[in-house]
Image (cartoon, rainbow, N blue to C red):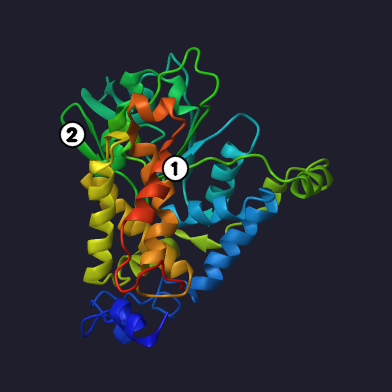
Amino acid sequence: MDSQQHTAWSEAPQGSVLSGAADPDGTGRHAPGTAGGDGEPPDFHETCGQILGAINTVIDGKAEAARLALTVLLAQGHLLLEDVPGVGKTMLAKTLARTIDCSVHRIQFTPDLLPSDVTGVSIYNQDKHTFEFRAGPVFANIVIGDEINRASAKTQSALLECMEEHQVTVDGHCYALTDPFMVVATQNPIEMEGTYPLPEAQRDRFMARISMGYPDPRAEMDMLETHQSVSPLSRIRPVAGVGEVRAMIAAVRNVYVSPAVKEYTVSIGTSTREHPHLRLGASPRALLQLLRAAKAAAALDGRNFVLPDDVASVADAVLAHRLLLDRRAVTAGENASSVVASVLAKVPVPGGAGRLIS
């Protein structure tokens, strides 16, 4: 990438994060990789490296999945882990939660689970003659929803307001959820008996979907060596507090996005909506979350500006689970990931004929 293109992506307005101002928006927040005030991590990349290192000691051979999970956390999104049993979906969610000194609740979704079991319920206090709200497990910084597709559609819908508005409405009263708030849900796409597949509106709430896949033989050998006597999860200690995570999220939010990259993102969304193999393309919410994930990816790479490469690197994880293929595409052997790849190959990259290398 030449210097002219580099300037095009990083030419932030005066006083933005890129300008190097100590306090770009008057809130005490700083750009990724810079020292901050009270509650901020001493070094953005050092903290991210510690989190990823802790996850990789538990989940062998899945560094990319760990990085994407951290990307979603920093982008204030929600994560869907979808794969066959036994490949570490729940373990990844637990490990990410253990690396942060915050509140964590786990919900085992079953067919008899009720919406009030997730959000909470109002109970009548006979002494005070009033109803008191008892908060459900959704009131936590990180909520692990295990086998989310085992619960009925009514129970699944209890998460819709939580994931979008970060609040719960019970008996006409709104209760704000803690900040940061992230839902990490798992589901098994193979055994569909007795399950309730997530509807499109629910899938659209998840910023990204990860398919773990099987580890390579070397990683499995390491797992057999280290996971026999004691669970590696017991050795994980928090490396960041809630205040530090909030500061990291604020830093990611301030990453600069040029108009050209925004146009590139919109072009990707438009292309999915016009694609002949799709019945449903990317929603406006999907494009917002795509850009947020790209900003987090740029920050993890040590930049405070977004490249088209950042958008392309997270496009499959952010868009594929939202797309609906038509019958002809399924018959022809296409899948959502292949369609996303064809869209990325078709949409021209601004500022050059090919994809940029950061």
Write down the quadrant of residue 164 in the picture: top left
Neighbours of disc 1 within 10 Å: few (<14), some (14-19), many (20+): few
State the separation of the CA atoms marked 1 and 2: 45 Å
Q: Amino acid at mark 1?
A: Ser
From the viewer's perspective, tell me whether residue 39 is left or right of residue 158. right
Write down the quadrant of residue 246 in the picture: bottom left
Q: Position of residue 344 (x, y in %)?
A: 37, 54
Q: Amino acid at mark 2?
A: His
Q: Residue at x 24, y 56 (%)?
A: 267
Q: Quadrant of the N terminus?
A: bottom left
Nearer to us of marks 1 and 2 is 1
Tag count: 2
Q: Is residue 53 visible?
A: yes
Q: Which mark is residue 338?
A: 1
Q: Residue at x 39, y 42 (%)?
A: 339
Residue matched to label 2: 173
Q: Residue at x 75, y 49 (%)?
A: 219
Q: Position of residue 69 (x, y in %)?
A: 49, 51
Q: Residue reaching furthest left?
A: 172
Q: Between disc 1 and disc 2, whose residue precedes? A: 2
